[in-house]
Amino acid sequence: MTPIAGTASDLRALLSQESCHVMPCCFDALSARIVEQAGCPLTFMSGFSVAAARAGLPDTGLLTVTEMLDQGRNLCNAVSIPVIGDGDTGHGNAANVQRTMHQFKQAGFAGIMLEDQISPKRCGHTGVKEVVDRDNAVERMSAAVEARRQGADLVIVARTDARSAFAERYGERRALDEALWRLKAFADLGADVLFLEAPRSEQEMQRFCNEVPGKRMANMLEGGVTPLLSPEQLGAMGFNLVAYPLTLLASAAFAMRQAVKDLQNGKTPETMLSFPELKALVNFDAYDDTVGKQAH
């Protein structure tokens, strides 16, 4: 009854295809299963969404790696598609990064995203961010690549927040230059997927695709600072993955608010799954079949 999430090899095979894959981001086992049942070939466990759904907290590094791993194990056990986990800063120095890699592998993830923010980090589309210097950023990514070589076989998504972190101090052009330098360095080290967080224009996104080799990820946050483009447009630019980090969380929160209002007004919410649909989503029939066979 328990699926096993796709592996790093499955994810690499997916990335080898000449297409831009739509990747709705999940936050628990149920949302991951909804993504899988919709036919999406992979998903991403969003740190923002997990912090919100699990603890009602902002995405500012407040959840521990233990909490993220616990959420990830449940999530990876619920689906058979590859899952990328949000590894934030790697939770410390180079040794911490390597341990985080091994822990994410053991939890069932196929990939991990690691970034160059200082700790505690914060959501890439909110407030003022700081990143570590070049040497520390390179050391962090080198540690991840070495951990992969030593058995923590994960697809490494290398993210930089330098575009936002340096814009006020050095100007937008130099900030983007620095971000692209870091992404090229991460690619040279062996990162599998490169991620420029929070570009401000289509021109910046295209420059990223033109100048940084390898597989590239776009992040489509409704209400964020990056232009919202279709998967077709992003694929034409040169992106291989498009993440929707908060779409499911925001949609679920909106639906729950509306349902509560309906109940307060004495109405049964109209936009909801039927009870049979809900039972099917959590595999009640499979459970009953198993119990029935054991009884006989």
Image (cartoon, helix red, strand yellow):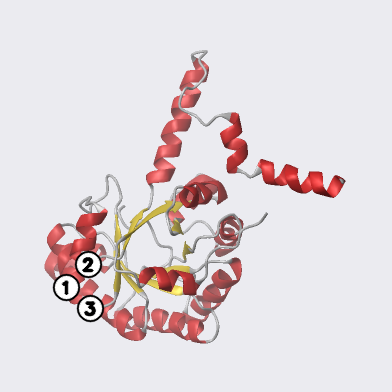
State yes or no: discs 2 and 1 in contact (Cβ < 8 Å).
Answer: yes
| 143 vs 176: above or below | below
Of the numbered discs 1 and 3, the one sitting upstream in the chain is 3
The kind of residue on which mark 1 rests is Asn
Nearer mark to the viewer, of 2 and 1: 2
Residue at image point 52% right, 76% down: 96
Residue 6, percent from left and from top: 52, 66
Mark 1 to mark 3 CA distance (whole Å):
13 Å
- Give the residue at the far top of this rendering: 266
Q: Residues within 10 Å of mark 3 (few under 14, many from 20)?
A: some
Which residue position is annotated with label 2? 238
Q: Label 1's element?
A: helix
Query: Mark on residue 210?
Result: 1
Residue at image point 55% right, 60% down: 80
The kind of residue on which mark 2 rests is Gly
Nearer mark to the viewer, of 1 and 3: 1
Query: Which one is nearer the viewer's eye here, 68 or 127?
Result: 68
